[in-house]
Amino acid sequence: MHQLNSVLEQCEAVWEDWNDQTVAGRIALLQRWSDTVAARGDDFAHAAKMIRFQCENAQRLLDKVHELPGPTGETNELYTAGRGTIAMTGDASLTSIALCGQLAAALVAGNCVVVSVEGSHADNADAVMADLVKAGCPDRVAVRVGLEVCSDLFKHPQVVGVATTGTKEHVRDVNRQLAQRQGVIATLVAETDIEQYSVIGSPDYVLRFVTECTRTINITAVGGNATLLELGSGEH
């Protein structure tokens, strides 16, 4: 448990800088990552396509600040940000495509990721995460921990959500573990279709990993236009 706490604290330490990078900057980095993953061949070539797919959706859905209506002398903007640290897992049916799709969506949205998977999936996770660092991703933005701490990972208060791929029975088991959490509820994002990837392959999948934020700026200068200042004051 001490080691898990240390890993999550390190993720927390780098999360703010990662989240503060522009969406376009994260997209450019992940696209470089997809090229490195594709060079591994076989299923990784398809996984690289999934990474690019998530980047394209992020560019369409996240890489824009929306201006909202507001009173005179004020600007209001709507934008997205990462939620924090996402736990990522899967059962024996997990594929490289699903793994990379989950990673890409969570990372491009501005989150850190802690992966906990079994057997050969751990080797694949280590490989693609090493490629991620080679592409320029800061260390500790994505890390892997042993499967033996998976249950503690799900219940940890610093984990804001869990993404998993597996059978319906596996998803139910993960959901039961999340239900035992104390405090803040963690979001579950689950894929059970490893043939068509109906969840991970949806055009708005990346939105499951963001939070909406608003930014208000008062642009009325002190001592400025008195007409603007008195609008709506009720005085004539």
Image (tube, rainbow, N blue to C red):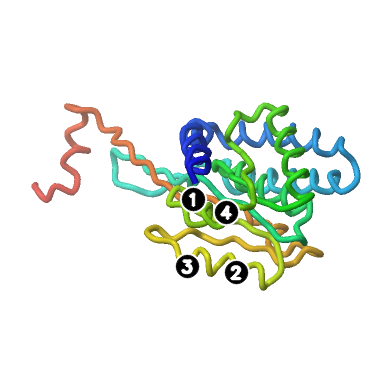
Residue type at mark 4 is Leu
**Tag shown at residue 179:** 3
Q: Which residue is mark 1?
A: 159
Q: Residue at x 71, y 69 (%)?
A: 167
| Of the two numbered discs 1 and 2 in the rendering, the one whose residue sits closer to the viewer | 2
Q: Is residue 16 left or right of residue 148?
A: left
> Which residue is depicted at the point 80% across and 47% down?
47
Confirm whether residue 81 shows in the render.
no
Tag 2 residue: 173
Measured in 3D between alpha carbons, the distance from the residue under mark 3 to the one under mark 1, in whole angstroms, is 13 Å
- Kind of residue indicated by mark 3: Ala
Q: Amino acid at mark 1?
A: Val
Q: Residues within 10 Å of mark 4 (few under 14, many from 20)?
A: some
Image marks 3 and 4: residues in contact by CB distance under 8 Å: no
In depth, the one of 9 and 230 nearer the eye is: 9
Q: Which badge, 3 or 4, is on the more N-terminal residue?
A: 3
Residue type, mark 2 in image: Asp
Residue 128 higher or lower than 221, as above or below: below
Q: CA distance from mark 4 to mark 2?
A: 24 Å
Sequence-wise, which precedes: disc 2 or disc 3? 2
For residue 137, above or below residue 157: above
For residue 181, side relative to residue 227 (left or right): right
Which is more toward the observer, 119 or 210?
A: 119
What x and y, as percent, mark residue 56?
70, 45
- Residue 60: where, in percent of width, then height? 63, 46
Per the model, the C-alpha gap separating discs 1 and 2 is 17 Å
Find the distance from the CA under tag 3 to the CA under tag 4: 23 Å
| Secondary structure state at the residue bearing disc 2 | helix
Query: Mark 2 to mark 3: distance in Å?
Result: 10 Å
Inter-mark Cα distance, 4 to 1 = 17 Å
Residue matched to label 4: 207
